[in-house]
């Protein structure tokens, strides 16, 4: 009878130790999760290396998935276009006629610009992209608007470089791993892009809304000169994006500007080009602390100005003798 009681008591003590160990593990896991959450909120860049490793690891599978998705989308779009061809035929003919007129006008403007540039002695320079790659994913389930690119540091991609498609600006490189990169889309709420209205010098800022649209904020407030259908392009201010690249089309007017839809939709874009920063000097100037920029004449002038004057020696004290 005493042996049976000892076995029951030992079994109960073992169960208690197991339950206590389980509680300790759960508490430690919760504390670790809280610490990681606090670090991620205070220092978002602390986990950029881990995100890069995870992005590199999942990049091959994401590229295969993107290719399959693109093929499937093209098949369904072909079927839908065949079924709706009869209804769209008249509208397409009208659009083709308008496109021919616009093409003739564009060729006339291009010829005029060529003659003016020849008179001014300007040389037409083409921009060679740093890399051409596929957009392999996006943050559709997040409040932020990011895209993931199948090219990284090994291809020459660096943070700050503009990303564009054949239609217009998509965004800029935010982080670059070895074989993949994270792109901040122009529709993200943290994206601000200097733009101007095509055809005149109405300048503004394009601010992302996080819902696929952007806000056009005019710099000069007063009577709103914008109209529905106005096209905005990059202005070149800030030094990241070269001027003249299509950005958005105005769809609705507001008190201080307008709401516009982007011309280059990342959801319908497969391949994009990463271009070099238009003015690297401007980017370096923006990253230079103001104290360092104005700290000495040599820093401001790049070493070309004269050295700072040497302070005059203090006058000698009179000799007591």
Image (cartoon, helix red, strand yellow):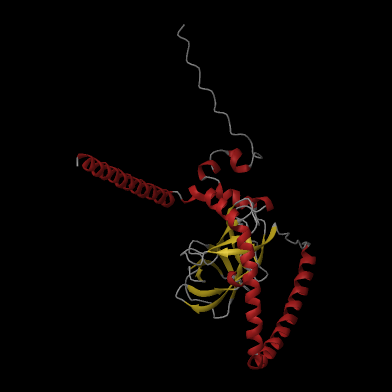
Residue with the most extreme left position: 1
Of residues 20 and 66, the one nearer the viewer is 20
The residue closer to the viewer here, 313 or 2, is 2
Residue 184 position, x and y percent, is 55, 61
Quadrant location of the N terminus in the rendered image: top left
User: Quadrant of the rendered structure where residue 7 is?
Assistant: top left
Residue 252 versus residue 4 in the image, above or below: below
Measuring from the top left, give residue 95's x and y in whole percent.
67, 87
Does any portion of residue 77 appear in the rendered image?
A: yes
Identify the residue at horizontal 78%, vertical 70% (top origin).
114
* Nearer the observer, 39 or 280: 39
Front one among 47 and 309: 47
Location of residue 71 in the rendering, given as x and y in whole percent from the top left corner:
66, 73
Side of 90 relative to 38 (left or right): right
Based on the displayed image, in which of its 4 quarters is residue 112 positioned?
Answer: bottom right
Residue at the spot 63% in from the left edge and 50% down from the top edge: 178
Q: Which residue shows up at 70% across the image and 82% down it?
A: 102
Number of marks in the image? 0
| 163 left or right of 6 in image | right
Can the viewer see residue 237? no
The percent position of residue 246, horizontal first and vertical second, equals 63, 70
Residue 7 position (above or below residue 79)? above
Q: Is 50 located above or below residue 171 in the figure?
A: above
Q: Farthest residue toward the top?
A: 321
Is residue 53 placed above or below 269 in the rendered structure? Answer: above
């Amino acid at each position: 009878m005493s042996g049976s009681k000892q076995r029951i008591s030992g079994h109960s003590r073992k169960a208690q130790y197991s339950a206590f160990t389980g509680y300790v593990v759960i508490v430690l896991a919760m504390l670790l999760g809280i610490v990681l959450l606090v670090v991620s909120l205070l220092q978002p860049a602390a986990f950029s290396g881990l995100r890069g490793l995870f992005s590199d690891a999942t990049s091959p599978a994401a590229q295969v998935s993107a290719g399959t998705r693109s093929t499937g989308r093209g098949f369904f779009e072909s079927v839908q276009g065949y079924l709706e061809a009869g209804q769209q035929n008249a509208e397409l003919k009208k659009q083709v006629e308008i496109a021919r007129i616009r093409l003739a006008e564009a060729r006339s403007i291009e010829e005029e610009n060529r003659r003016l540039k020849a008179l001014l002695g300007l040389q037409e320079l083409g921009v060679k992209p740093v890399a051409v790659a596929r957009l392999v994913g996006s943050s559709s389930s997040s409040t932020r608007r990011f895209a993931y690119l199948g090219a990284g540091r090994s291809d020459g991609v660096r943070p700050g470089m503009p990303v564009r498609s054949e239609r217009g600006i998509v965004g800029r490189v935010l982080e670059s791993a070895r074989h993949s990169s994270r792109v901040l889309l122009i529709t993200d709420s943290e994206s601000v892009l200097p733009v101007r209205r095509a055809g005149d010098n109405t300048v503004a800022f394009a601010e992302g809304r996080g819902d696929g649209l952007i806000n056009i904020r005019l710099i000069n407030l007063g009577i709103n000169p914008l109209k529905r259908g106005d096209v905005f392009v990059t202005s070149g201010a800030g030094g990241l994006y070269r001027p003249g690249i299509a950005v958005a089309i105005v769809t609705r007017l507001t008190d201080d500007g307008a709401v516009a839809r982007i011309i280059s939709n990342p959801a319908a874009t497969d391949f994009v080009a990463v271009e070099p920063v238009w003015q690297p000097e401007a980017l370096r100037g923006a990253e230079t602390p103001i104290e360092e920029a104005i700290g000495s004449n040599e820093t401001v002038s790049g070493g070309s100005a004269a050295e700072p004057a040497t302070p005059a020696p203090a006058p000698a004290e009179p000799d007591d003798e």
